[in-house]
Image (spheres, rainbow, N blue to C red):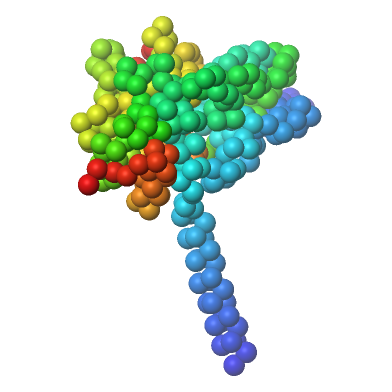
């Protein structure tokens, strides 16, 4: 009898993550997340299709995000892209200058429990081609050197806002990026942005591993 | 005989499928105006006057593509080089990134023509 009970408990425990993921999937569907987010790949490949995008693609959310951050964000979304998801869709002109007006915000306001279930489900959505374990955490990040690379040589701040230092607004803010994103994904995205989003407006550069490691380490500790 | 015909049809099908798969992975050529809107407007602005949404954060004002005076001092080759390899390749700002990893040579050539329409000017010979 004891053996049967133990077996039943172990079967239940093994089934639990799948059930949780299924709940999360049901919540994603009932909350119509797919009406704004693309929940299945592949990514769109034309500018015309990009212009129809209402929210970031989530079909590789499990490769991109940190789960703890997702749980918090799904309960109370904040603005991560000050220029909107596709900045072109939020532009208006004042005189000669372009300005951003009312970029759309994520309407998600799930309870803590539902947010955890949705995050569990989202974390199952991965790009199997992404190399994991690529990021190497540095004992001491050469922040001054990283700032020269990112704010002078490559001018990442032309499009991204750095914490306390400002920057452009056509791309996601670096505020809280270390909490938000998986460093392996950051490495992969900086190395080849178009692998993830063929029509993203971030230029592809040829960075060596040392430069990528420096940038990602900096972003993980940027505050 | 039937088997042979079936094999040749299957082989032709595989060839066609291979061609389609290859066509699917190749990036489709976009119109210059669409490429301009997606990649250039963020800094150079919808009117091309250098007043894009990122411009206030830049230490160097983006070039005014609508200005004949600004644009006619540049050769078409140097404009193409700046688009492909970035500002630093033509001794200008690193804030102009290299788009050679995104745009094909043909798209860059089309972009240079589009810029000449915007400035209503010809390049320096």
Can residue B42 be seen here? The reply is: no
Return the x and y of residue A48 as percentages of the image width and height.
Answer: 58, 43
| Quarter assignment of residue A163 | top left
At 49% across and 53% down in the image, what residue appears? B28
Which residue is located at x 59 percent, y 30 percent?
A: A89
Q: Residue at x 71, y 29 (%)?
A: A33
Residue at the extreme left of the image, as rendered = B91
Does residue A223 lie above or below A49 as drawn? above
| Quadrant where the image shows the C terminus of chain A | top left
* Residue B123 seen anywhere in this rendered image of the structure: yes
Q: Report x, y in % for residue B15.
A: 50, 72
Q: Is residue B55 above or below residue A32?
A: above
Lateral position of residue B117 relative to residue A107, left or right: left
Q: Which image quadrant: the N terminus of chain A?
A: top right
**Number of marks drawn:** 0
Residue B61 picture quarter: top left
Q: Nearer the viewer, residue A208 or B64?
A: B64
Comparing B90 with B51, the one in front is B51
Q: Position of residue A179 (x, y in %)?
A: 49, 15
Residue B43 versus residue A78: which sits nearer the camera? B43
Task: Judge left or right: residue A4 versus residue B22.
Answer: right
Residue A114 on image: x %, y %: 72, 19
Question: Which residue is painted at 59% across and 37% down in the image?
Answer: A51
The answer to which quarter of the image holds residue A192 is top left
Query: Eyeballing the image, is B109 above or below A178?
Result: below
């Amino acid at each position: 009898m004891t053996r049967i009970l133990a077996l039943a408990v172990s079967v239940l425990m093994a089934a639990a993550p799948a059930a949780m993921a299924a709940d999360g999937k049901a919540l994603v569907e009932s909350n119509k997340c797919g009406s704004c987010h693309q929940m299945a790949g592949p990514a769109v490949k034309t500018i015309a299709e990009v212009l129809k995008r209402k929210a970031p693609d989530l079909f590789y959310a499990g490769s991109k995000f940190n789960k703890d951050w997702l749980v918090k964000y799904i309960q109370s979304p904040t603005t991560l892209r000050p220029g909107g998801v596709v900045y072109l869709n939020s532009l208006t002109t004042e005189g000669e200058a372009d300005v951003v007006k009312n970029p759309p915000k994520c309407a998600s306001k799930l309870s803590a429990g539902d947010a955890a279930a949705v995050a569990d489900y989202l974390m199952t959505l991965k790009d199997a081609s992404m190399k994991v374990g690529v990021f190497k955490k540095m004992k001491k990040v050469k922040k001054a050197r990283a700032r020269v690379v990112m704010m002078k040589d490559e001018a990442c701040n032309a499009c991204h806002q750095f914490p306390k230092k400002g920057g452009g607004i056509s791309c996601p803010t670096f505020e809280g990026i270390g909490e938000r994103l998986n460093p392996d994904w950051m490495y992969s995205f900086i190395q080849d942005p178009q692998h993830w989003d063929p029509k993203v407006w971030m230029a592809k550069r040829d960075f060596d591993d040392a430069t990528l490691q420096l940038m990602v380490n900096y972003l993980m500790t940027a505050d | 005989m039937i088997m042979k015909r079936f094999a040749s049809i299957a082989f032709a099908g595989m060839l066609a499928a291979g061609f389609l798969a290859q066509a699917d992975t190749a990036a489709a050529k976009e119109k210059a105006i669409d490429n301009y809107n997606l990649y250039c407007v963020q800094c150079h602005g919808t009117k091309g006057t250098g007043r894009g949404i990122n411009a206030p954060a830049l230490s160097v004002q983006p070039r005014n593509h609508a200005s004949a005076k600004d644009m006619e001092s540049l050769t078409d080759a140097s404009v193409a080089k700046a688009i492909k390899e970035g500002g630093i390749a033509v001794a200008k700002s690193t804030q102009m990134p290299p788009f050679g990893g995104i745009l094909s040579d043909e798209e860059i050539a089309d972009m240079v023509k589009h810029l000449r329409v915007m400035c209503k000017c010809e390049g320096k010979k």
